[in-house]
Image (cartoon, rainbow, N blue to C red):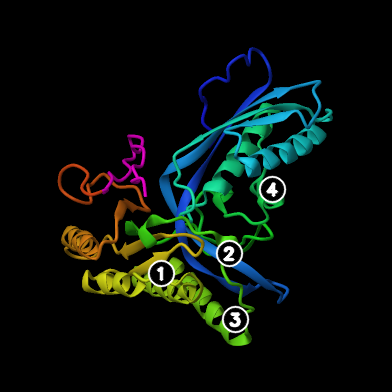
Amino acid sequence: MIPAAHAAVPGAGDLPTGTGHAPCHHGELLQGVFLDDDGHRCAGLVTLPMAGPGSGAEFVRRPGTAPEALTVVPADRTKAARAAALAVADCAERNGQPPCGGELRLTGDIPVGLGMGSSTSDVIAAVRAVADSYGLRLAPGTVARLAVRAESACDPLMLDGRPVLFAQREGRVLEVLGPALPPLVVVGCALGGGAPVDTLSLPVREPGDRDLRAWERMRTGLRRAVATGDVRLLGQVATASARRGQQVLGHPEFDALTAIARRAGAAGVQIAHSGAVAGVLFDPAAPGLRHRVRSCLRALDAHAIPATRTFTTFTTTKEILDGPAHRGVDRPTRPDTPRRPARLPAL
């Protein structure tokens, strides 16, 4: 949903103004190369949704100005600026109007460079704000198409958390895995001291047939895990995918993280394939959950792996741990109250 209000842009007056919002994610559960319905190879991923942090946008349209007279605040959000320009051209054509300039203002609290989709969140919020200024609500497929044109590849944040295998470089869904992921409790952490990862500098290896078969087996396993609500199977798939990702990322803490998960009785681990954010995955129905989570947090601290936030992928009225937030553990969403803003440490 697009929020009803953002802070007003100074001097906007009665100019056509729109608002937009987009969430983030917590890295990937699965990423690799897969076959589409026509048998073609496609890079694809399944992200782990995360409520809380996100990007907000407000766009003030100035009819009669040149399309290139479009500014963005902060000025370094170049991908969002490109997305806004593309969205203006698309929306103006839909409404039978000439494209024009305007001002885009972005706000957000997503850490940059950790693999949480900060740039895609900015881009989607910008596209939605532009569309709202024209009185339009664009379909997710259209938003995805514009996002890929703006930043070459995007995350499936326009799909509002549905578990899908998404071709990030093409902006299309390869497979809808189900209506929702199995319920999870995720102990978030950051590897490599939380240093941002420059994905463009990572080595690129052409996958072979053996790699493709392995990823397709993971895809089948994740599909089954979603269909049956099998958290243990989901954790096995996520861990296998993360382990393959280490061939490129090479996080020195990976073996320690998987050992911590094993000792704490977790289902597995997930790691952003383009960043440093990671998570230890727990089944909320497992006995002794509070003890498991506390044990995991203590072990992370002992290995100097900074914990960030413990969160759930479901709605609950119970605390994960007794008492107030502990070491970044946040309150799960209640059905009758809004979630508190996420507090991720400055990493």
Q: Nearer the viewer, mark 3 or mark 4?
A: 4
Residue type at mark 4 is Ala
Under circle 2, the secondary element is helix
Residue, disc 1:
251
- Crowd rating for badge 3 (residues with CA inside 10 Å; few <14, some 14–19, many 20+): some
x%, y% of residue 115?
48, 56
Under circle 4, the secondary element is helix
Circle nearer the N terminus (4, 2)? 4
Q: Nearer the viewer, mark 2 or mark 1?
A: 2
- Crowd rating for badge 2 (residues with CA inside 10 Å; few <14, some 14–19, many 20+): few
User: Which quarter of the figure has residue 126?
Assistant: top right
Question: Vertical placement of 248 versus 46: above or below?
Answer: below
x%, y% of residue 107?
51, 33
Circle nearer the N terminus (2, 1)? 2
Under circle 1, the secondary element is loop
- Would you say the residues marked 1 and 3 are in contact, meaning their CB atoms lie under 8 Å apart? no
Left or right: where does residue 328 sit relative to residue 98? left
Residue type at mark 2 is Ser
Left or right: where does residue 276 sit relative to residue 34? left
> Residue placed at 49% from the left, 44% from the top?
23
Mark 3–mark 4 Cα distance, whole angstroms, equals: 29 Å
Q: Residue 292: in sight, yes or no?
A: yes
Image mark for residue 212: 3
